[in-house]
Amino acid sequence: MEITRIEVSSRFKKSFRRLPPKIQRKTISRIKLFKENPFDSQLRTHPLSGKEKECWSFWIDYRYRLKFIFLNGDEVLFLDIGTHDIYK
């Protein structure tokens, strides 16, 4: 499965701008990997639970996560990025 279209929320844009430059660069490379295969084992893509059960997340690194939803099939919306606090 390949992702053909990624939309980004205004919250995602704002959070991305606040990330350290090193994490921004790592995020861009992870997004490229995500587009090719959203379930690549390096990303540790997983569904969230509870009140966010429609959302998914993947790892940028040990500390940072990217939260998203599947819109339909091969399209996604990036909701937020940051540390585990984005789940609150």
Image (cartoon, rainbow, N blue to C red):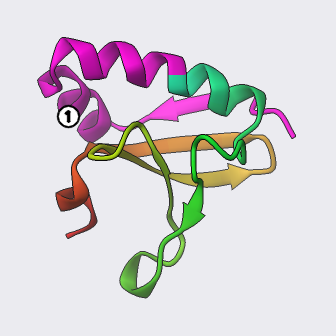
Query: Foreground: 44 or 55?
Result: 44
The residue drawn where x is 28% and y is 34% is 10
Residue visible at 76% across and 36% down in the picture: 37
Dot 1 alpha-carbon crowd within 10 angstroms: few under 14, some 14 to 19, many 20 or more? some
Q: Identify the element where label 1 is drawn.
A: helix
In screen coordinates, is 77 left or right of 14? right
Q: Is residue 24 above or below residue 58?
A: above
Question: What stretch of residues is rendered in magenta?
Answer: 1-29
The C terminus lies in which quarter of the figure?
bottom left
The reply, left or right, for residue 50 in relation to residue 45 is left
Above or below — where is 32 with respect to 45? Answer: above
Image-based side of 55 in relation to 65, left or right: right
Q: Residue furthest bottom?
A: 50
For residue 46, side relative to residue 87 (left or right): right
Three-letter residue code for mark 1: Ser
Percent across and percent down for residue 23 are 28, 23
Residue 9 x %, y % = 37, 38
Q: Decide whether residue 10 is among the magenta residues.
A: yes
Q: Quadrant of residue 24?
A: top left
Magenta highlight: main SS: helix
Q: How many marks?
A: 1
Residue 54 place in picture, x, y as percent: 54, 72
Q: Residue furthest right?
A: 1
Instruction: Give the residue pinned by disc 1.
Output: 15
Q: In this view of the protein, which residue sits in the foreground, 55 or 38?
A: 38
Give the image location of residue 82, x and y in percent.
Answer: 24, 43
The N terminus lies in quadrant = top right
Residue 68, can we see it?
yes
Q: Picture quarter containing residue 87?
A: bottom left
| Residue 5 appears in the figure | no
Nearer to me, 73 or 59: 59
